[in-house]
Image: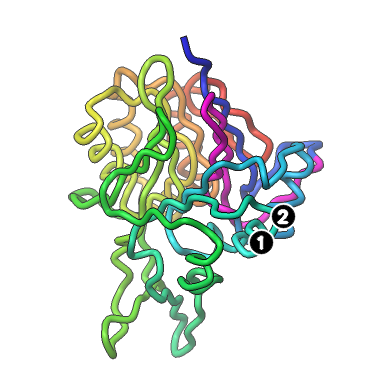
Amino acid sequence: MSKAPKIACIVDNAVQPGSRLRGEHGLAFLIEIESGRVLFDTGQSGAVLLHNLDMLEIEPASIDALAISHAHYDHTGGLPALLGPARPGLPLYANPDLFRERLSRRGDEFKSIGLPLAQETLRAQTVLHMSAEPQQILPGMWTTGEITLRPEPMGSSPHHMIREGDRLIPDPYQDDMALVIEVESGLLLLCGCCHAGLLNTLSHVQRVFERPIVAIAGGTHLAGTSSNHLQHVGQTLLEMASLQRVYPNHCSGTAAFHSLLLALGPEIVRPCPAGTRLDL
């Protein structure tokens, strides 16, 4: 029997008490399986990412592949620093819409919040695997592909914009994806921000992969969500008989964490600050 995957939160807004790791508004996970190591997202800055990898005794050159959930700076900001010490030709998995310009609008002011590197730079330093379809990264680990059906609310912000020709329009988050990881009793869904919507992402994975989801971890973008929707999410997860663990962090929000905790209980819902190793 193959060994269970080892999954650790490398970067998050919060840090485990007493840890020497650093926190910032960002996200990164490291997944270790028998066939290799995969880094999922890179946090907001190279300084925090490389410091935390060093504290956990993880050499960037030991990472076999990189997956990016979406283009926002708090998930891609560590890319420039990571690629220096990373192995040449590092495979990078993402949605083809990753390279679209992304902006945050506050009144009449616009701020770039997308990738810190140009497509040409990434193409020169990595091997790009860009697809809207699910992709196998390593045996037992896949991208979700694009979340195309979105009947449930998305994890959106009124400030997020993209350019469409000469116009600015709300970001449809076409690039948003998550990872699906095979564990002993089913699948683990590892999320970046779930801008496509947590429930939409869950439905997509159940439809495409046709195996029970036993764990959910990462950013769920439930911060600022109405109490009615939080109750709806909690009830939906409660009805998933296979679900054993939920590790919300990053953009999930305190209210969502406590709402899910009340709905599902402390045996299932657990905190996931930087330094957490998921109990699977």
Whether residue 138 appears in magenta in the rendering, the answer is: no
Residue at the location (27% across, 23% down)? Answer: 211
**Is residue 202 depicted above or below 92 in this figure?**
above
The quarter of the displayed image where residue 262 is located: top left
Spatial separation of the CA atoms under disc 2 and disc 1: 6 Å
The residue range painted magenta reads: 20-42
Residue ID for mark 1: 45
**Is residue 185 depicted above or below 218 in this figure?**
above
Residue flagged by tag 1: what amino acid is it? Ser
**Is residue 5 depicted above or below 128 in this figure?**
above
Residue ID for mark 2: 48
Residue at the location (66% across, 46% down)? Answer: 14
> Looking at the picture, how far across and down is residue 75, in whole percent?
53, 57
Q: Are marks 2 and 1 in contact (CB under 8 Å)?
A: yes
Answer with left or right where residue 14 lies relative to residue 211: right
**Is residue 32 depicted above or below 256 in this figure?**
above
Residue flagged by tag 2: what amino acid is it? Val
Residue at the location (28% across, 90% down)? Answer: 166
Q: Residues within 10 Å of mark 2 (few under 14, many from 20)?
A: many
Answer with left or right where residue 131 lies relative to residue 220: left
Residue at the location (31% across, 83% down)? Answer: 168
> Looking at the picture, how far across and down is residue 1, in whole percent?
46, 9
Name the element at disc 1: loop
> Looking at the picture, how far across and down is residue 94, in whole percent?
40, 54
Name the element at disc 2: helix
**Picture disc at residue 76:** none
Q: Residues within 10 Å of mark 1 (few under 14, many from 20)?
A: many
The outermost residue toward the top is 1
